């Protein structure tokens, strides 16, 4: 088993993944907190392990994907304290099935995009579009030959909602329950419909444009904590894979064992 950590701007996903069966994945989330020390994070990781009745002897390795550079070293040290293991840090120079040769500086590509693209390419028929919906919404295109073609970044659902509520005097903060009609006279329902249906239409439109640019239809897979609110309202056939990034971390780890 390995400890697989995907650190984002809002949450840190802590996964315990079997080396023999990537369907056996335990995953919990911690809040990304710049003020926490490596010892505090180590204790939180050990608490998760204890919850699943796991000991450090059960782990053969660890791998970290991070888009928060100031905390990467802190989390790496926390893993060493919790497991006495030096974690592998995902970067654009590692061995992988996809190719980053199109990028002028592969190491500048976000680690979350790398692991998502790797898993999407290996698990879904390419060309494939990998969507990750979190603090930001990202779309990455991987060609039939495995080349990372690029992608785009949009504000995430909650980022957009917060900006809308903070920038207006009369619009409230809302939850992301299922929307009703597209057209409504209720303010809260109007915001909910706007954010859900609007993001669904946005994804559908971007997928169509990406397919038009390459002249091929694509498989599409979505992951991330907010995907479940939007993907059901898209018209494209989009597969949901909540464990996509954990699977990608396992793949990268296996490919880079010395």
Image (cartoon, grey):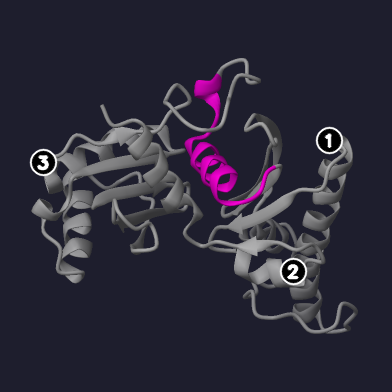
Query: Which residue in the structure is indicated by mark 1?
Result: 214
Which of the numbered marks, if any, corresponds to residue 84? 3
Q: Nearer the viewer, residue 162 or 63?
A: 63
- Residue 43 on image: x %, y %: 16, 55
User: Across the whole image, how many numbered discs are drawn on residues?
Assistant: 3
Asked if the magenta segment contains residue 60, the reply would be no
Query: Which residue in the structure is indicated by mark 2?
Result: 196
Q: Nearer the viewer, residue 162 or 75?
A: 75
Q: Earlier in the sequence, mark 1 or mark 2?
A: 2
Count residues near mark 1 (Cα–Cα under 10 Å), then give few for <14, some for 14-19, many for 20+: few
Q: CA distance from mark 1 to mark 2?
A: 28 Å
Q: Earlier in the sequence, mark 2 or mark 3?
A: 3
- Residue 77 on image: x %, y %: 20, 37
Q: CA distance from mark 2 to mark 3?
A: 44 Å
* Residue numbers of the magenta segment: 106-126
Quarter occupied by residue 28: bottom left
Camera-near label (1 vs 3) is 1
Regarding mark 1 in the picture, which secondary structure is present there? helix
128 vs 182: above or below? above
Does the magenta stretch mainly form a helix, a strand or a loop? helix
């Amino acid at each position: 088993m390995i400890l697989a950590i995907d650190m984002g701007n809002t949450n840190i996903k802590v996964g315990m993944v079997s080396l023999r069966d990537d369907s056996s994945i335990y995953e919990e989330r911690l809040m990304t907190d710049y003020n926490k020390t490596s010892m505090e994070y180590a204790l939180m990781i050990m608490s998760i392990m204890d919850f699943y009745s796991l000991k450090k002897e059960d782990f053969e390795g660890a791998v970290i994907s991070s888009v928060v550079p100031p905390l990467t070293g802190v989390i790496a040290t926390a893993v060493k304290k919790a497991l006495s293991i030096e974690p592998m840090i995902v970067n654009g120079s590692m061995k992988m099935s996809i190719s980053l040769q199109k990028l002028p500086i592969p190491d500048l590509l976000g680690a979350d995009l790398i692991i998502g693209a790797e898993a999407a390419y290996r698990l879904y028929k390419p060309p494939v579009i990998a969507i990750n919906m979190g603090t930001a919404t990202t779309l990455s295109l991987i060609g039939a030959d495995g080349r990372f073609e690029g992608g785009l970044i949009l504000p995430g659902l909650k980022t957009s909602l917060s900006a809308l509520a903070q920038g207006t005097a009369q619009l409230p903060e809302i939850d992301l329950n299922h929307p009703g009609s597209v057209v409504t006279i209720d303010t809260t329902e109007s915001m909910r419909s706007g954010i859900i249906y609007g993001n669904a239409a946005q994804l559908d439109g971007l997928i169509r444009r990406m397919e038009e640019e390459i002249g091929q239809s694509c498989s599409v897979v979505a992951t991330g904590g907010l995907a479940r609110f939007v993907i059901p309202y898209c018209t494209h056939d989009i597969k949901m894979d909540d464990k996509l990034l954990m699977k990608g971390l396992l793949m990268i780890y296996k490919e880079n064992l010395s």
